[in-house]
Image (tube, rainbow, N blue to C red):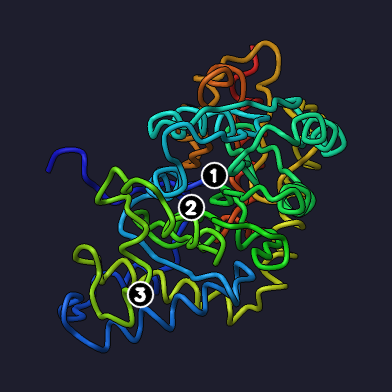
Amino acid sequence: MGFLHKANYIMMTPGPTMVRENVLHAKGNYYGNSDFDPKFFEFYGQLCKKIGKIFGAKKAQTIIMAGEGMLGLDSACAALTEKGDKVLVISNGLYGAGFKDLVEIYGGEVTVFESDVKDKIDTDSLRVFLEQHKDYGFKYATVVHCDTPSGVFNNVKDICKTLKSMGIMTVVDTVSAVGGAEVKVDEWGIDIALGASQKVLSATTGLTIMTVSDDAWKAIENRKSPIPSFYCNLSLWRDCVEKKLFPYTMPIGEIAALGLSIDNMFQEGLDKVIERHYTAAEYTRNRLMDLGIELYLKGGYSPTVTAFYVPEGYDLEEVYNHMLEHHEVMVGKSYGYLADKVLRIGHMGENARFFRIDYTMRALEKTLKELKK
């Protein structure tokens, strides 16, 4: 029937990631009505608290929303931005720069701080910039933890603590990092942190996860104008569990599957999960370099994704297609200015297992030998 079929390849992309069988099975069970069943509200509330531990959120509220991770980015900007607000967009990659469009849609006036796209944000330069603009009146700043198209990984701890000390709220896209790297939203002063189900958490695609601080809630509640959206209106989520009323019908199967993927992580141990990601990242990059393959970045390497150049004399599309068709491994292409330059391996979530990474690297090595001219 059409294109739908059971995939025969392993998905070593930087999201969506491989999903365990028990999580896939959980999604297909019958759970009743998510609009009215009090047991679902209880489950939702408990799951949010459990996920909050992954985000380091004891004070901040954790929310699960129905919609892919981009919903979180859009909702955060819609909630915090009013016409004329000054917003700082911290950018060293495609996704970092992309916040500019999201802010401007809601009338924000954007200033962009740009850093080397091949390395992590230079925090010293950022501090100098902030000191030079201390009277500019930034309401909030945006930053990406792991800019997935390149795999550059930023020190959001220092960045957000610096911003918070200057009275600037922070929005952090940690979609491709949280769970595979340390995140402590309360301690680091992150006002809105954004995650998604299909990345490190290794659940099925379709859910946004976010944490919202007390300062962010105050800013939302004290807006002079209404949030210009319904689906992206964070204010509707403030007391949804207590009121037993969600803004719209929640995908109960997707949330049940997410719950089981979170249980899988806790069973392994959150510290061990993070350690596994750093080990997987180091192994991946070492294997690539052993093959004589040049990494895209010069620093700021992520524990969850690695971008690399296809060796000279090889065609990127040919390498990608050969790995998929002959070795049943799908790696990631990239976007924007990197679209035709790099391939990416997502060593995140269930992908960050030795047997999957080893198989992927063997497939890449065989592909290069088989395509050698």
260 lies above or below 326: below
Counting residues from the start of the chain, the first of labels 3 and 1 encountered is 1
Q: CA distance from mark 3 to mark 2?
A: 32 Å
- The residue nearer to you, when weighing 327 against 246, is 246
Q: Secondary structure at mark 3?
A: loop
Q: Is residue 300 above or below residue 65?
A: above
Q: Which label is found at residue 17?
A: 2
Q: Amino acid at mark 2?
A: Thr
* Residue shown at the point (66%, 38%) measured from the top left: 151
Residue drawn 52% across and 58% down? 216
Depicted 184 relative to depicted 72: above or below: below
The amino acid sitting under disc 1 is Pro
Looking at the rendered structure, the kind of residue marked 3 is Asp
Q: Is residue 338 visible?
A: yes
- Asked if disc 1 and disc 2 are in contact, CB closer than 8 Å, the reply is yes
Mark 1 to mark 2 CA distance (whole Å): 7 Å
Q: Which residue occupies 65% across, 46% down?
A: 145
Q: Quadrant of residue 143?
A: top right
The residue labelled by disc 3 is 239
Between disc 3 and disc 1, the foreground one is 3
Say which quarter of the image contains residue 114. top right
Q: Is residue 3 above or below residue 316?
A: below
Quarter that holds the N terminus: top left
Q: Position of residue 293 (x, y in %)?
A: 75, 27
**Element type at marker 1?**
loop
- State the image coordinates of residue 297 (x, y, percent, origin top left): 76, 30
Residue that mark 1 sits on: 14
